Amino acid sequence: MVESGHPRHLVAVIGAGPAGLYASQYLARQGMKVVLFNRDIKPGGLAEYGIFPDKHKMRLGLKAQFKRILSMPGVTYQGNVSIGRAGDIKLDDLRGMGFQAIMVTTGAQENSWLGIPGENLDGVYQANDVVFHYNQLPERNLAEIKIGSQVAIIGVGNVMLDIVHYLRYENTVQTVTAFARRGPTQVKFDKLTLAPVADCLDLPAIEQAVNQAACEVENAGGDVGEFYALLEEAHNRAERCDSGLKFGMQFLRSPRRLIGDAGGRVRAIVFERNRLVRNGEVISARGTGEIETVPVDTVIFSIGSRVDEGFGLPVGHGTYVTNPEPRFPVDGISYEVYNPELCAQCEDIFVSGWARLASEGVVGLARKDAERGAKAVLQYLQTLKSSTDEDMEDVLSRIGSAKTKVVNFEGLQKLWDAEARIAADLGLEEYKFDSNEVMLRVIEEN
Ligand SMILES: Cc1cc2nc3c(=O)[nH]c(=O)nc-3n(C[C@H](O)[C@H](O)[C@H](O)COP(=O)(O)OP(=O)(O)OC[C@H]3O[C@@H](n4cnc5c(N)ncnc54)[C@H](O)[C@@H]3O)c2cc1C
């Protein structure tokens, strides 16, 4: 028994993004022994490889918190280890290693496609291709992204705006147009994320697009004034757009097909125009059959993420399926992975963060979700008859025999120190190694 009153149990947390880190902190504070596995060498997930590179204050603040969590005596970090059906260690093997509960916080690793013809043409990318490129995520960082001069982004959320922010610094780009299937009052971005690119807005073109949609917006009970207010608030905080890039938006359009040129590169998108249909609080888009072809040379899909189907847990609507009748609900929410085919629970497996709510919210929300999920894990552990008498050295040696080159907290500190030294030498706020090979070498040599 430990101070918290909970018997000590051995818990595997899979994925060291914000959700996994905060879940580990919560569990360790309750006296659990936590092993935090991470596919990437470095922890942080999208806080390290998603949040826009120039948000130094936020990124460094989170990193400092993450370091504190990883230095807690009850938390053992095991980076460069991927778990799951195609991973270094299978879920079943974790049970064999002595883990009594498993918390899956692997995030939503894949982007969604629409499944329309032409998505495999050159010049067509997923949001993650671009985000991981400018954030230098090893293994997922395409060496080259061929951005042309006329870019279309499908989707109107904050990730779209981060991509426009990045494209501001790409010399080739003249126009970026974000396409929404619904109207201007359904956009999903906020003024703070718009601010860095608000001065690039092509206001006459946007006004024209809003006017075109205004009738539909009004019929659905909306007010385009709200959209203009959002633009104005962002504009008041705008940075100067000196790149010449023109950033426009179009509404009420769903892509139906991408057309390629003779060389196999995308040259146009065929859209169907939509109207808005209100059903109670829900406003949805319905196709009108009216078709329009828009010339582009680059298309980026930014329509949300989904979990990795290869992980080996049941997936529905882009996330891992949870038990609709949870045994350990927390604030009415189910964190228990559920297998509808077998109509049984994966009793000891829990899920939280973006793995439970793909693309939903910011780091603060992932933290709340993870802490609630950790409470569910604790409730489950209290039902077990035995606590753990596993020695951590034995557990680590079992992990070490399943995977070589595991990176622990000591290795991370060497990496962080080396990155800080290089940043100081180069006069940069931050410096990042961009390949696993280099990181492993740095750890070995220091
Ligand atoms: C482009 C972008 C910009 C964003 N900007 C902001 C922002 O400015 N501010 C903000 O607060 N939020 C921002 N967010 C949201 C924030 O990043 C997420 O809310 C948060 O990262 C979700 O945390 P998570 O731990 O659930 O998932 P993730 O952060 O995705 O972490 C998942 C972790 O799991 C690991 N993993 C995956 N598969 C496996 C496996 N099989 N085995 C072991 N480990 C595995 C990964 O390596 C990763 O470390 C942004 C998100 C994106 C996509």
Image (spheres, grey):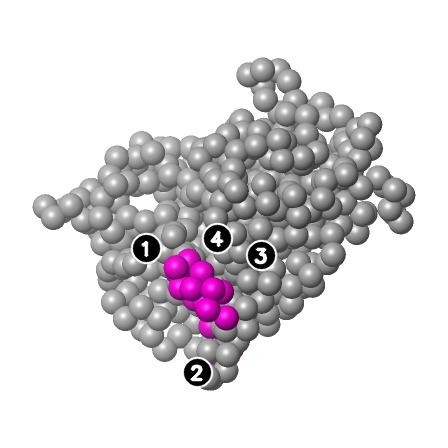
Marks 2 and 1, how far apart at CA: 25 Å
Classify 10 Å Cα crowding around label 4: few (below 14), some (14-19), many (20 and above). Answer: few
Was residue 434 drawn as part of the magenta stretch in this picture?
yes
Q: CA distance from mark 1 to mark 4?
A: 24 Å
> Where is residue 110 shown, x and y percent of the image?
44, 42
Between marks 2 and 4, how big is the CA–CA gap? 29 Å
Position of residue 129 measured from the top left corner of the image (x, y, whole percent): 37, 52
Instruction: Tell which circle, 3 or 2, labels the residue nearer the N-terminal end.
Output: 3
Residue at the disc numbered 4: 405
Q: Nearer the viewer, residue 193 or 272?
A: 193
Q: Secondary structure at mark 4?
A: loop
Q: Is residue 286 left or right of residue 322?
A: left
x and y percentages locating residue 236 in the rendered image: 54, 73
In whole angstroms, how far apart are the C-alphas of marks 4 and 3?
9 Å
Q: Secondary structure at mark 1?
A: loop
Could one spot residue 278 in this view of the protein? Answer: no
**Type of residue at label 4?**
Lys
User: Which residue range is magenta in the image?
Assistant: 428-446
User: Which residue is disc 3 drawn over?
Assistant: 408
At label 1, counting other C-alpha atoms closer than 10 Å, the crowd grade (few under 14, some 14-19, many 20 or more) is some
User: Which numbered disc flags the more N-terminal residue, 1 or 4?
Assistant: 1
